[in-house]
Every structure is written in structure tokens, then in C-alpha cells.
């Protein structure tokens, strides 16, 4: 079995690759993996082993059709994680998001067709649905993305489906809720707040903190991706939820307690433009059809994640201070 993983030096892709290399997916213990990642600001080459007999790392851009055509022959499957992933950056400028998330995905899909790749999984997000005040989204709900990030992810998600419908590409799509865990770039809420607390800085909380997000440990998301790769049906979408819905304020309270700090460390900042109020997924389809269930209890996973950042300052300082200056991040 040979897999090509795009975006494998990022947060979720690298977790997936490490787990597979560690033998975490039964039947895939011998799988050989090619990672294609352009090592953007969000990536860290240290997220993956320097040398591994079953890993080939290629620094490259998914928008390059010749590169993908060169790499793809002989692979049995492609798992497409690569994306520009930070909503705030897409509010500043959508250029990179349109390029990577739309053109990049179209290029990956075309290359998969041309190279006759037998199986493809496209990683989408719950943010494509927009915002929901009550109830939860099923896979049939309309896509009403509100941020440029979500809009480009919705476009790529629909492109993937269209390649199934039009060309018969064997592609399935996952729409997952917010992930947390080790190796997440410190521009994202949980690592930003934990690392700010470790540095004695304040926590820039958007608005009144009542926005609700559903959290899932990255290990559970990756297991769902593997289930979809192995057993998902072509052309189908699978929601992947965590069931842990929390306001950002409640989540901040948990992080403060974990780090031994109090609410005086919170600094309210102007709300994000177009900030979605609530995300909530109905993921009964993947549970019933593929036997998926999350395993990591939220409080345990969150404590372990905070502990990982405490123990790995070199990793997060390199990521945090390599990024361009960001007024929201500068929360002290
Ligand atoms: P990330 O930003 O940590 O990683 C993305 C990776 O893609 C990086 O390594 C980056 O270098 C690479 N990349 C970006 N542009 C590229 C290009 N043009 N060519 C090659 N590589 C490129 O993001 P993540 O949090 O790991 O998210 C992975 C996927 O999961 C994304 O598609 C994202 O939309 C989706 N997703 C994320 C979450 C979440 O909570 N993080 C939730 C649901 C879905």
C-alpha cells in the first residue's frame, strides 16, 4: 500500500502520518507514505521523522500539476489535508486561500484522475455549513460559509464531489469540527492561549466569548479519516464531530485552571468580522455506517495538550515567532 498525503507537515496531516508510521492503523503497518508539503509558515518539518524507511518527504506545492504527476504513479490512495487553514488570515487577505484551497485542490483532483488513483479522501471542515443557532448539521444541509477560509473550503469540498459525479473519481469527503492536540500552530485558539499563559501574557478573547465550538482530539479525527479511506463510499460526505460543545469563554476557563491562572488574564478584543456564533455537527452517519466514535475524553485530551506545550517550548516558540506579526496574537 502506498499513500500520498498532502499537507503532511501541518497539524492534522502530521498526526495522521506519524500514527500510520507508528503502526496505529491496523492493516497499514507496512504502508509507504509520500508527503507533499510546501513547508508554509503553518508547517514544521520536525512534525515528522527526519528519516524513516517508509516515509518520503517532498517539499512542493500542490498547485504544481507536473510535480503531482511526477509523484503520483504507483500510489494506491491520496489523503488531501493541505490547505490554508487560519480564518483570521483569510479575513486579512483571501489570496493564498483561493490559490491553495481552490486551485490546489483542483490540481490534486486532476492529477489523481490523470494518474488513475484508486482512492481519494478530501479533508473538509464543519465551517462550510456556516453558523447554526440550534440543532446540528447533517451532511444534507446547505453550505453557507461565512469566512473566506470557509468559502474556499466549501468550494474545494464541492469540487471534490463534482469529480466523483462528473469523472467517477473514487473520492469521499470529511467535514470535521474544531481539532485540538499537540503540534497545532500557536495562532489557533488553544495553543495561542496555553502558550500566552506559559509566557505570562494575556489571552485575547474575541467579543464576549459566547461563540460555541465543538472540539475533537486530532487523534479521533485522524482515525475517522482512516475509516473513511478504508470504508467510506465514493461521492459521500461524512461529518466528524466531537460532541464537546463549549463557549470560547468556558474553554478559556478550563485553560486558565489547567495553567493555574485566573480570569484577570483575559483581555477582551474586538470580535472577528463575520464571526460564526455556533458550530454543531450531527455525525450519526459516520457512527452508524463506519462504526466511528471519538475516544479521547475532552478534559483528559485538553490537559495532555497543555502539558505537551509546557514540555515543548522549542517547538512552539519556533512556530509562534516565525509567523508574521499579528496584532491579535500580541495579547499582552
Ligand atoms: P495546518 O495549517 O496546520 O496544515 C496545513 C498544511 O498544508 C501545512 O503543513 C502547510 O504547509 C500545507 N500547505 C499549505 N499550502 C500548501 C500548498 N500550496 N502546497 C503544499 N502544502 C501546502 O492545518 P490543519 O489544522 O492541519 O488542517 C488540515 C486540514 O484539515 C485542512 O484542510 C483544514 O481545512 C482541515 N480541518 C482543520 C480543522 C482544525 O480544527 N484544524 C478542522 C476541520 C478541518
Image (cartoon, rainbow, N blue to C red):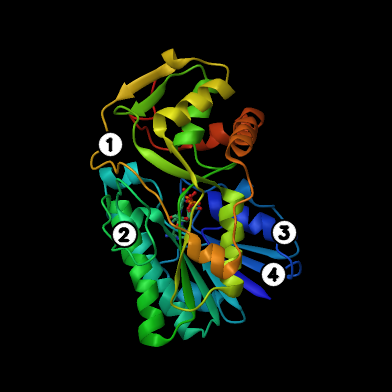
Q: Earlier in the sequence, mark 2 or mark 1?
A: 2
Residue at x 42% of width, y 13% of height: 264
Q: Could you tell which of marks 3 and 2 lies nearer the N-terminus?
A: 3
Q: Are marks 4 and 3 in contact (CB under 8 Å)?
A: no
- Residue occupying image coordinates x 51% and y 84%: 115
Residue under circle 1? 272
Which circle marks residue 152 in the picture?
2
Looking at marks 1 and 4 on the same chain, the residue that comes earlier in the sequence is marked by: 4
Residue 210, by quadrant, is top left
Please state the horizontal and vertical placement of residue 240, each as a whole percent of the image: 49, 57
Which of the two labelled residues, at mark 4 and mark 2, occupies the earlier sequence position?
A: 4
Q: Looking at the image, do the residues carrying marks 3 and 2 touch, with CB atoms under 8 Å apart?
A: no
Q: Nearer the viewer, residue 81 or 249?
A: 249
Mark 3 crowdedness (10 Å alpha carbons): few <14, some 14-19, many ≥20: some
* Residue at 43%, 75% in the rendered image: 109
Tell me where residue 51 appears, x and y as whole percent. Answer: 72, 56
Front one among 221 and 317: 221
Quote the CA–CA distance across marks 1 and 4. 41 Å
Query: In x, y percent, where is residue 274?
Result: 23, 43
Q: How far apart are the alpha carbons under marks 2 and 1? A: 18 Å
Q: Is residue 100 above or below residue 30?
A: above
The numbered mark, 4 or 3, whose residue comes first in the sequence reads 3
Q: Nearer the viewer, residue 39 or 209?
A: 209
Residue drawn 32% across the image and 54% down it: 150
Amino acid at each position: 500500500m502506498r499513500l500520498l498525503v498532502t499537507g503532511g507537515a501541518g497539524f492534522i496531516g502530521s498526526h495522521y502520518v506519524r500514527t500510520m508510521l507508528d503502526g496505529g492503523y491496523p492493516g497499514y503497518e507496512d504502508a509507504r507514505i509520500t508527503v507533499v508539503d510546501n513547508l508554509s509558515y503553518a508547517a514544521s518539518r520536525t512534525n515528522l521523522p527526519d528519516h524513516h524507511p517508509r516515509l518520503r518527504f517532498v517539499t512542493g506545492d500542490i498547485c504544481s500539476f507536473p510535480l503531482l504527476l511526477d509523484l503520483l504513479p504507483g500510489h494506491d490512495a491520496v489523503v488531501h489535508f493541505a490547505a490554508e487553514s487560519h480564518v483570521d488570515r483569510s479575513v486579512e487577505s483571501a489570496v493564498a486561500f483561493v490559490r491553495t484551497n481552490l486551485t490546489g485542490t483542483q490540481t490534486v483532483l486532476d492529477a489523481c484522475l490523470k494518474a488513475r488513483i484508486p482512492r481519494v479522501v478530501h479533508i473538509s471542515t464543519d465551517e462550510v455549513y456556516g453558523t447554526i443557532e440550534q440543532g446540528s448539521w447533517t451532511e444534507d444541509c446547505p453550505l453557507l460559509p461565512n469566512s473566506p477560509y470557509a468559502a474556499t473550503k466549501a468550494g474545494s469540498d464541492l469540487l471534490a464531489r463534482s469529480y466523483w459525479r462528473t469523472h467517477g473519481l473514487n473520492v469521499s469527503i470529511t467535514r470535521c469540527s474544531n481539532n485540538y492536540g499537540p503540534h497545532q500552530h500557536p495562532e489557533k485558539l488553544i495553543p495561542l492561549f496555553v502558550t500566552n499563559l506559559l509566557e505570562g501574557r494575556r489571552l485575547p478573547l474575541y467579543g464576549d466569548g459566547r461563540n460555541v465550538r465543538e472540539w475533537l482530539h486530532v487523534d479521533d479525527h485522524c482515525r475517522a479519516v482512516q475509516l473513511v479511506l478504508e470504508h467510506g463510499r465514493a461521492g459521500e460526505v461524512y461529518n466528524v464531530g466531537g460532541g464537546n460543545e463549549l463557549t470560547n469563554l468556558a474553554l478559556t476557563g478550563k485553560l486558565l485552571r489547567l495553567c493555574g491562572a485566573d480570569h484577570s488574564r483575559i483581555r477582551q478584543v474586538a470580535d472577528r468580522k463575520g464571526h460564526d456564533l455556533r458550530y454543531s455537527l450531527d455525525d450519526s452517519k459516520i457512527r452508524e455506517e463506519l462504526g466511528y466514535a471519538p475516544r479521547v475524553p475532552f478534559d483528559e485530551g485538553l490537559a495532555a495538550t497543555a502539558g505537551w506545550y509546557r514540555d515543548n517550548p522549542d517547538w512552539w516558540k519556533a512556530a509562534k515567532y516565525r509567523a508574521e506579526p499579528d496584532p491579535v496574537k500580541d495579547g499582552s
